[in-house]
């Protein structure tokens, strides 16, 4: 099979060959992030590996970090990318942002591509494949995870106590007298470690004190003209309130994007938030303060965790520490106007 060339990548990405060269050399040509993403996706699809003789290749790659995220439609990840870019730039690093679209195949391809590019370090906004962590350890490639992992992961990890996040929100709703609470989340087969721990935290607090209904989506797939997580919250709320029986007095989204969909559905059903039904989420996205009503949420301290992750990677790059480090941050409940005392 013929090896892919830079010309092939340019054709598939719909850009010039010189643009592909600038992207892989790291030249500061003010190329947009969306164009870079097209080039990386084309290179990944074709199995293209840039040659080490690209001008300034080794020099530039020594000062470039990569951030992998599972999607860009959830506003948490663009916010994370913005924080990583600003903090990395302050330390003299450039940044490549890669969207895997929750595809394990894409994740593996991009990982191989980043190794061939000899980036200085990789940050993950999700739990990566164990095989990738072992390969990175063997190669001496610094990796930091801004998320949660199982104990013993061979990489730096800056996590959040998601169990406590669930507990804080559950205690808040109990304090307001809510005895039947629903939480809407991703499909059970694809639920992430952090989401599982949020739900487990809610269960611990509510056990024997209130009823918790866990409603899972059917599939988790990015949508071309809509946000999957908003749509999940919207559709599952409509289904929940259209069936008979005693309705929940509070509905929680597994993240703020899902909660925004919940808000829209409740309002379309003619229910007032929070007078009829309280609503809350997790992440404390900047937009959550500006939806109506403003959303009660659990702050995940994204800026602080990002700074810590880049400090850890920088320590590895500069040989100040060679052992994996785990730093666990404690979440903070932000109470806004979308929650109040349960309607009896």
Image (cartoon, rainbow, N blue to C red):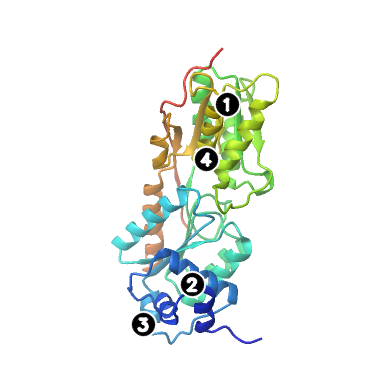
- Residue nearer the viewer, 185 or 303: 185
Of mark 4 and mark 1, the one earlier in the sequence is 4
Label 3 SS: loop
Q: How many marks?
A: 4
Which mark lies nearer to you, 4 or 2? 2
Sequence-first disc among 4 and 3 = 3
Can residue 28 be seen in this snapshot? Answer: yes
Mark 1: which secondary structure?
A: loop
Q: Residue at x 49, y 63 (%)?
A: 98
- Above or below 24: residue 213: above
Q: Pointer 4: what residue? A: 255
For disc 3, the marked residue is: 56
Q: Residue 39's mark?
A: 2
Q: Nearer the viewer, residue 295 or 335?
A: 295
Kind of element beneath mark 2? helix
The quarter of the image holding the N terminus is bottom right
């Amino acid at each position: 099979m013929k090896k892919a060339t830079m010309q092939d990548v340019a054709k598939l990405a719909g850009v010039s060959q010189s643009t592909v060269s600038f992207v892989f050399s790291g030249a500061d040509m003010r190329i947009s992030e969306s164009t870079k993403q097209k080039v990386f996706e084309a290179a990944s699809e074709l199995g293209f590996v840039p040659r080490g003789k690209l001008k300034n290749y080794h020099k530039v790659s020594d000062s470039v970090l990569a951030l992998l995220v599972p999607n860009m439609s959830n506003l948490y990840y663009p916010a994370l990318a913005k924080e990583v870019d600003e903090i990395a730039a302050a330390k003299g690093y450039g940044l490549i942002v890669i969207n895997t679209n929750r595809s394990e195949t894409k994740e593996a391809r991009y990982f191989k591509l980043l190794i061939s590019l000899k980036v200085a370090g990789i940050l993950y906004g999700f739990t990566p494949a164990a095989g990738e962590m072992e390969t990175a350890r063997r190669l001496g490639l610094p990796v930091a995870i801004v998320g949660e992992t199982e104990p013993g992961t061979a990489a730096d990890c800056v996590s959040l106590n998601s169990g406590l996040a669930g507990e804080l929100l559950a205690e808040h709703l109990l304090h307001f007298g809510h005895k039947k609470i629903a939480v809407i989340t991703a499909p059970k087969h694809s639920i992430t470690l952090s989401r599982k721990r949020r739900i487990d935290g809610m269960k611990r607090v509510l056990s024997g004190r209130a009823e918790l209904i866990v409603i899972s989506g059917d599939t988790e797939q990015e949508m071309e003209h809509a946000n999957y997580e908003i749509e999940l919250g919207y559709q599952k709320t409509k289904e929940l309130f259209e069936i008979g029986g005693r309705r929940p007095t509070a509905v929680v989204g597994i993240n703020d994007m899902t909660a925004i969909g919940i808000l829209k559905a409740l309002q379309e059903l003619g229910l007032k938030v929070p007078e009829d039904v309280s609503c809350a989420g997790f992440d404390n996205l900047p937009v959550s303060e500006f939806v109506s009503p403003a959303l009660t949420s659990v702050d995940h301290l994204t800026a602080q965790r990002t700074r810590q992750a880049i400090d850890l990677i920088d320590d590895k790059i500069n040989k100040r520490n060679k052992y994996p480090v785990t730093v666990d941050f404690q979440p903070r409940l932000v109470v806004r106007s979308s929650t109040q005392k349960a309607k009896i």
